Structures are given as C-alpha cells and as structure tokens.
Amino acid sequence: MPLDVRRTRNTVALASALVPCYGVARETRLRPTALRRPVTMRVLFFAHLKDVTGCAETELRLAAPADANELWRQLARRFPELAGFRSSVRLARNCEYVGTDGRFADADEVGLIPPVSGG
C-alpha cells in the first residue's frame, strides 16, 4: 500500500502510518532532515564488470531517497564505461534482485550482476 505523505511547515506526516497509543491513534511524524540524510552503500562488481571498473567494489554515497536510476547516474559519473552495460546488468540489494523501481537504504550492499553463461 503506497504511503500518503503530507508536508507541513516543520514535519512530514505519513497519513497512512497511524500508530495506536493506549487506544488513541496518533500520527507518526518524521523530521524532514531524516528524509534527506545521505545513503551510503557498498557496491560490488562481478565478472567482467570488475575489469570495466578496475575494482571489485566501491562505496557510493547518494542523496535520499536513493533509487536505481540515481544509483546508475552516480556509477556512470564515476565509471563512464559502465553506462553501456546498464540494459544487461541486474541489480541485487542485500542478495535479492531488485527492479528499476528499487529503493536503497543506508548500509545496503548492492551487487551489479551481468548476464552469465555456463556449460
């Protein structure tokens, strides 16, 4: 279920996140600064992507909210040769595949998984 976020002058209220408090529902409030905190993640490169980037892993810091598109933008800035592999590489967050709508949190481990073949 998508969250309904309503902004007020000093807080962000999640309208669908009502928390019961001794029988009375109260709204959960988040500080706007908490939503903008940078996300630091460990990015792992596999197979030929190690050769393309020249490393097996790197640390990446993104502005929150961090999504797959922003991750690819930052990676392409740091490793321009990597941009050509975007259409064939899958992303895995904490050992589970994510789609193009994937979101990332602080301390996530993200793997770039190229297509492989074996025999």
Image (tube, rainbow, N blue to C red):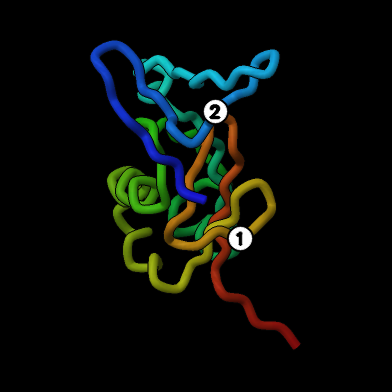
Give above or below for 101 relative to 14: below
Q: How far from the left and from the top, in percent, is residue 70?
A: 34, 46
* Residue found farthest to the left: 9
Q: Position of residue 9 (x, y in %)?
A: 24, 14
Splitting the image into 4 quarters, where does residue 10 fall?
top left
Classed neighbour count for the residue bearing mark 1: other residues with Cα under 10 Å, few (<14), some (14–19), many (≥20): some
Q: Which label sits on residue 97?
A: 1
**Is residue 74 shown left or right of residue 89?**
left
**What residue appears at the point 33 percent right and 43 percent down from the top-left corner?**
74
Instruction: Name the residue at 32% across, 61% down.
Output: 83
Residue 12 image position (x, y, % from top left): 36, 22
Q: Can you tell which quarter of the image residue 21 is in?
A: top right
Give the Cα distance between marks 2 and 1. Answer: 31 Å
Above or below for 34 versus 84: above
**Which of 112 and 82 lies nearest the eye of the viewer?**
112
In front here: 32 or 96? 32
Of tags 2 and 1, the one toward the viewer is 2
- Relative vertical location of residue 40 with respect to residue 93 in this rendering, above or below: above
**Residue annotated with mark 2:** 18
